[in-house]
Image (cartoon, rainbow, N blue to C red):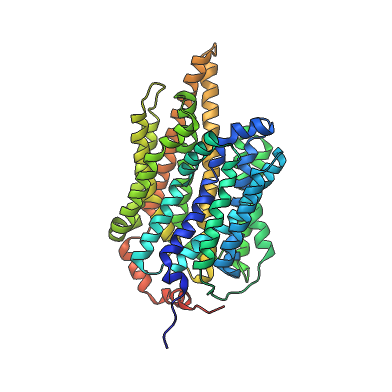
């Protein structure tokens, strides 16, 4: 008796387009609001000290609830949680766009983060369970990984356009249209076929994971405004370590673990999560400080700043397709991902040489190198992070991918921001009197030092990825071994629901 092919695999390339669009919306929302911040601040009248919460509220809710969102996708169905996430994200975006007070805007951003934590794991797990043929899977993850790498840059471009030609509120309203389109497509394309799993949640696991991740992101987010010596910073980070250690211990004994430890204990998947975390933290050296450089030093408008990142997007798209279709099948992530890390090191060191009078050609070379690096890191890492995961844990593995990216971004922002602020202050102190020229020179010097540190992030990623990823021969032998059979068998069990 033949088994009917699920609709989501018959229309799998349209499914890819749908989930990629949803992923793009989630990723770009981390940066699209940044360019609109001055306009929103002038409109709603909040202080410089408060403006960080417009960005932080999204990151806190998103980062802390991802593991729960991944498990909900495994429990209640990827299609259902994908659509719920889209509706909730659209509603939160509309609420934020219409906000007349600072408090309502921050609340809406937090609500966006909640539904992003539902949507992102569901989107990636749909992809993981839809594309099972190696060549097609590589191509699909090439597209998805490219979006993860370039979403922040697209957010800067779109944010600049909407802010200049409409107003800051459209940076939030635009999500309503994107989500509506993805919802209609998802409703038609995604199959109702699901794998039946347990539908129980371990409350202690949820509290430990969400609390630990919340305090981790919060602690790093407060490092720049409060300083590393602040009790809010070190107290939050210390409490986070305690809760996350407790979470790991709980997963070893829980009947219904939120994150089965076998997912992260696999060398390839562990290497992938670490690679995504490192890339996420280092990438902020480009988005954050290059934006400052182009706008404050070179006098670019928001739209010009966003457009300046276009070569990086093109490089990511081209590289991602070349790597996933040609180089990854031939050499594997053990060669391709470290190469991407090396390109990241080179790009950051190149950016560290920027001066006040440097032309855009200098920026362009660094952006192309960074695009090649991200296009080499993200797609293979996304693919390896979810390869061989049983269907029952696809959501949990997908959530770990997004968690790695979010935590990496939080760490990168905090550490690099703090370094930049410290270096700039020290420079100005050493070059009194602090006139405009000294302040401008201090900013350039702080950017240079920060890029050098970001190069160090990628250097660590190079060593970790080269050391941890399995060789192609080792991976092939492992997949053919009897121990791999249970996972493959569980992947094949699909029940109509």
Q: Which residue of the protein is positioned furthest toward the bottom in this rendering? A: 1
Q: Left or right? Give the position of 264 relative to 84.
A: left
Location of residue 328 by image quarter: bottom left
Location of residue 485 by image quarter: bottom left
Give x and y (percent) for residue 394. Answer: 51, 66
- Classify 465 as above or below 371: below
Q: Left or right? Give the position of 12 relative to 331.
A: right
Depth check: give the residue in front, 56 or 88: 88
Depth check: give the residue in front, 315 or 8: 8
Residue 467 visible in the snapshot: yes
Give x and y (percent) for residue 336. Answer: 33, 52
- Classify 105 as above or below 325: above
- Classify 402 as above or below 490: above
All told, the count of numbered labels is 0
Give x and y (percent) for residue 188. Answer: 51, 67
Q: Left or right? Give the position of 216 relative to 466.
A: right
Q: Which residue of the protein is positioned furthest toward the front in this rendering? A: 166
Residue 248 visible in the snapshot: no
| Quadrant of the rendering where the N terminus is positioned | bottom left
Depth check: give the residue in front, 153 or 252: 153
Residue ID at (65%, 71%): 200
| Quadrant of the rendering where the C terminus is positioned | bottom right
Give x and y (percent) for residue 43. Answer: 66, 32
């Amino acid at each position: 008796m033949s088994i009917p092919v699920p609709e989501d695999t018959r229309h799998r390339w349209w499914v890819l387009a749908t989930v990629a669009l949803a992923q793009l919306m989630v990723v770009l929302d981390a940066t699209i609001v940044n360019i609109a911040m001055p306009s929103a601040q002038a409109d709603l009248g909040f202080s410089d000290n408060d403006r960080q919460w417009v960005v932080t509220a999204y990151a806190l809710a998103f980062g802390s609830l991802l593991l729960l969102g991944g498990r909900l996708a495994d429990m209640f169905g990827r299609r259902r949680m994908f659509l719920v996430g889209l509706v909730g994200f659209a509603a939160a975006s509309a609420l934020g766009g219409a906000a007349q007070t600072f408090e309502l805007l921050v609340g809406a951003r937090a609500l966006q983060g909640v539904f992003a934590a539902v949507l992102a794991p569901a989107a990636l797990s749909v992809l993981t369970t839809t594309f099972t043929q190696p060549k097609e899977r590589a191509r699909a993850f090439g597209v998805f990984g490219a979006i993860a790498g370039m979403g922040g840059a697209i957010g800067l471009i779109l944010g600049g356009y909407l802010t200049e030609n409409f107003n800051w509120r459209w940076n939030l309203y635009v999500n309503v249209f994107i989500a509506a389109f993805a919802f209609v497509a998802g409703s038609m394309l995604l199959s109702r076929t699901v794998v039946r799993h347990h539908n129980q949640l371990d409350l202690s696991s949820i509290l430990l994971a969400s609390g630990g991740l919340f305090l981790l992101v919060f602690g790093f987010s407060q490092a720049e405004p409060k300083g590393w010596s602040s009790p809010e910073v070190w107290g939050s980070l210390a409490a986070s370590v305690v809760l996350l250690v407790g979470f790991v211990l709980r997963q070893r004994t829980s009947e219904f673990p939120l994150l089965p430890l076998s997912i992260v204990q696999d060398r390839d998947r562990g290497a992938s999560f670490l690679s995504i975390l490192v890339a996420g933290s280092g990438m902020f050296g480009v988005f954050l400080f290059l934006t400052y450089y182009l706008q404050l030093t070179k006098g670019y408008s928001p739209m010009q700043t966003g457009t300046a990142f276009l070569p990086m997007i093109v490089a990511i798209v081209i590289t991602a397709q070349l790597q996933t279709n040609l180089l990854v099948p031939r050499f594997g992530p053990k060669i391709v991902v470290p190469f991407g890390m090396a390109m990241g090191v080179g790009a950051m060191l190149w950016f560290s040489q920027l001066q006040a009078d440097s032309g855009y050609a200098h920026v362009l070379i660094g952006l192309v190198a960074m695009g090649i690096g991200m296009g080499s890191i993200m797609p293979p890492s996304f693919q390896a992070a979810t390869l061989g995961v049983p269907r029952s844990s696809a959501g949990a593995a997908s959530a770990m991918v997004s968690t790695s990216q979010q935590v990496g971004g939080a760490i990168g922002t905090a550490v690099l921001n703090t370094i930049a602020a410290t270096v700039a202050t020290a420079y100005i102190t050493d070059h009194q009197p602090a006139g405009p020229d000294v302040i401008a020179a201090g900013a350039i010097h702080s950017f240079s030092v920060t890029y050098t540190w970001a190069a160090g992030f990628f250097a660590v990623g190079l060593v970790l990825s080269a050391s941890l990823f399995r060789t192609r021969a080792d991976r092939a032998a492992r997949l053919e071994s009897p121990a791999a059979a249970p996972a493959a068998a569980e992947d094949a069990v699909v029940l109509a629901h």
